[in-house]
Amino acid sequence: MTRLTAATLPAPLPYDRTAVTPGIVHLGIGAFHRAHMAVYVDDLLPRDPRWGIIGASLRRPDTRDALAPQDCLYTVAIRDASGTTNRVIGSILDILDAGTQRDELIAYLADPRIRIVSLTVTEKGYCHDPATGRLDPSHPDIVHDLANPKAPVSAPGLIVLATSLRRALGVEPLTVMSCDNLPSNGKTARRIVTALAALHDADLAAYIERNVAFPSTMVDRIVPATTDADREAVRAATGYDDAWPIMTEPFTQWVIEDSFASGRPAFELAGAQMVDDVEPFELMKLRMLNGSHSTMAYLGYLSGYQYVNEAIADPAIHRLIHGLMTEEAMPTLPMDKAVLAAYRDQLLSRFANPALRHRTWQIAMDGSQKLPQRLLGTISDRLTAGQPIPRLALGVAAWMRYVTGIDEQGNAIEVRDPLAARCRAIADAAGRDAGRLVDGLLAITEIFGIALPANDSFRLTVTGHLAALFKHGARATVAAIASGRAPSA
């Protein structure tokens, strides 16, 4: 069968791709970016061809190796219960592997045509302490970049070098646009990049503070991992081979703080919301969607559900997640209650989409990096207000049960997490003693900080839930808490 390329496109793109020039470098060219920002940019190219994307993989060359033979074209398959719509995206002009093409990447970052550097490098790509949001100078990538400032491997290191080069060349400053699920992601990126620059050169740090823009954003679209069955479905529907198509849902949202250093595309013409303050939208998404997703991932996996739509179809899990959003997350959010209720109902419908095979195991990855943003902030706010946290605490307890690495049938769990080995060592030492396991994991200050572990209500609630998970299993524990009962430990 024919491979998807510029020469074999079954239908022309709605713009002349040969006229598109690069205006954006995107660090972390994974599935989410290709389902989200790259689609918005693709919608804008017929009006303004100056904003093509140069993608960069910072860790592995997989995406480049898959898409380079197809001229970086790929298919977005939009799925719901009514069927699938396939669309070819051409906004990505080139993909570089930072490991072997670092000089080319740095040249692009210094190119005057590039005005925006965007990021989807996940929480761990910021080389920070998730509990404080500050740069971790002991992170191996930061240690490397401090010793090798002209050959950085981290996203912050690349941005610092790019800014230094552009300042020396008299090139306009960049806009650094984080599209990761971090609280105040623009402020977080600014804080980390400026801190790293200060370790090199105080004047450069001051220049970044004055001139480089770091707009915060809120991004939302569910993007499951692509499977071989997905590739075959795209092949059957389109008549061509695509090495890495993207599966996603019809819903997409992008809220962007309108603060750019050297111009921007007209993102609003593609449906993005340009606002003065992203934080209310961001907090709503982190606490309602992401917090629910992580809770459902751990409890769903432990309950034997491979996919999110299977988990939310369990009446007890549905009640639990509805209650988590309504009674625990929504009261902490500074938005109209009717807006929040409508968002909750929309989320529950999206979770139930039978066409999106979103694996609980995929969402469960990197929990040590995600918990502070998705669950612990909400928990802290509720405890400060003297409010109960039964469902939120169950999400934390389920993560603790999950990182033991052994499921309820005694089978191994493949825990993908930067702190997996450390968590497993704590779990092995604690055995099935919930108190010892809670004590050990709460001592990881990079996740839990100092204040939460010192809160007796938090510690006791999590310990009781974890003991119930060990004794009764996830399904029985969820059923009890979802019904308002305290599970017997």
Image (tube, rainbow, N blue to C red):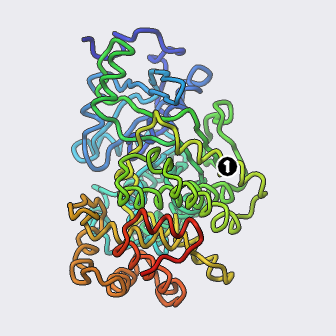
Residue 126 can be seen in this image? yes
Eyeballing the image, is 423 above or below 182? below
- Residue labelled with disc 1: 343
User: In x, y percent, where is residue 335?
Assistant: 75, 59
Quarter of image, res 484 = bottom right
User: In x, y percent, where is residue 41?
Assistant: 54, 31
Residue 41 vs residue 289, the one in the foreground: 289
Residue at image location 62% in from the left, 22% down from the top: 47
Eyeballing the image, is 143 above or below 297? below
- Mark 1 neighbour density, 10 Å: few (under 14) some (14–19) many (20 or more): some
Q: Is residue 8 left or right of residue 333?
A: left
Residue at image location 55% in from the left, 54% down from the top: 318
Residue at image location 25% in from the left, 39% down from the top: 62
> Element under label 1?
helix
Residue 113 can be seen in this image? no
Residue 268 vs residue 218, the one in the foreground: 218
Quarter of image, res 128 = bottom left
Marker count (numbered) = 1
Quadrant, the N terminus: top left
Residue 472 vs residue 249, the one in the foreground: 472
Q: Is residue 175 left or right of residue 238?
A: right
**Amino acid type, mark 1:** Tyr
Eyeballing the image, is 278 above or below 455? above
Eyeballing the image, is 11 above or below 370? above
Q: Is residue 268 left or right of residue 134?
A: right
User: In x, y percent, where is residue 163?
Assistant: 46, 54
Residue at image location 52% in from the left, 86% down from the top: 451
Quadrant, the C terminus: bottom left
